[in-house]
Amino acid sequence: MRSDQVRFAAVTEPVDPDVEFADARRRGELRRSHYGVLAMVAAGGAIGAGARYGAALLWPTAAGSFPWTTLGVNASGCLVIGILLVALTEVWTAPAWVRPFFATGVLGGYTTFSTYCLEIERLVAADRPEAALGYLAATLLAALVAVAAGARTTRRLLVGKTARRA
């Protein structure tokens, strides 16, 4: 068979009814639901970014010094996201807007990859490449440990209690 004669078999996998585009009513519903989610993410992001800005005002980082504030913000945000997502996915049933608002919006706005990268660049520009590399690694390690600790602790405290009650 020549390459221009290749035929593709129809996909027989099930389709999520929330993303079925054949029905015009579903397309409109999907469009409307996305605007609500976007609004929740934006509102949460404004709150989270405001909290991060507040932390930077409370604990400013001098030019060329180690950015402890951003490290603390990112680690604490990861701890909270570990707690929140276990609570929302394994313990409680929450309205559909809660995860986008808190996890993506508030915590996405609170934790900051852009500032993290900018501070690495500033440390390198201040001729402190060792500090920049240390900050890069410390943030990654702190974030991973924090999210795992938050998830594990929440699972141990909340999931264990709900399983014992049932």
Image (tube, rainbow, N blue to C red):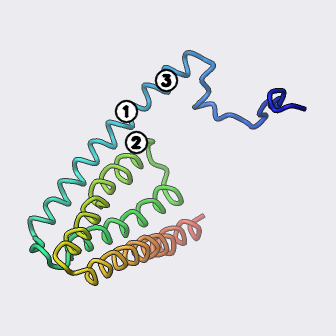
What's the mark number on residue 36? 1
Dot 1 amino acid type: Gly
In this rendered view, identify the residue nearer to me: 49 or 101. 49
* C-alpha separation, residue under disc 3 versus residue under disc 2: 16 Å
Q: Which mark is residue 93?
A: none
Q: Position of residue 123 (x, y in %)?
A: 21, 74
Q: Is residue 7 left or right of residue 133?
A: right
State the image coordinates of residue 69 (x, y, percent, origin top left).
Answer: 19, 72
Q: Secondary structure at mark 3?
A: helix
Q: Disc 3 marks which residue?
A: 29
Nearer the observer: mark 2 or 1; the answer is 1
Relative to 166, is 11 above or below?
above
**Which of the 4 quarters of the picture holds residue 61?**
bottom left
Which quarter shows the C terminus?
A: bottom right
Q: Amino acid at mark 2?
A: Trp
Label 1: which secondary element? helix
Q: Is residue 93 above or below residue 80?
A: above
Label 3 Cα neighbours within 10 Å, binned few <14 / some 14-19 / many ≥20: few
Tell me whether circle 2 and circle 1 mark residues in contact (CB < 8 Å).
yes
Name the kind of residue labelled 3 in the image. Answer: Glu
Which quadrant of the figure contains the N terminus? Answer: top right
Res 97 label: 2
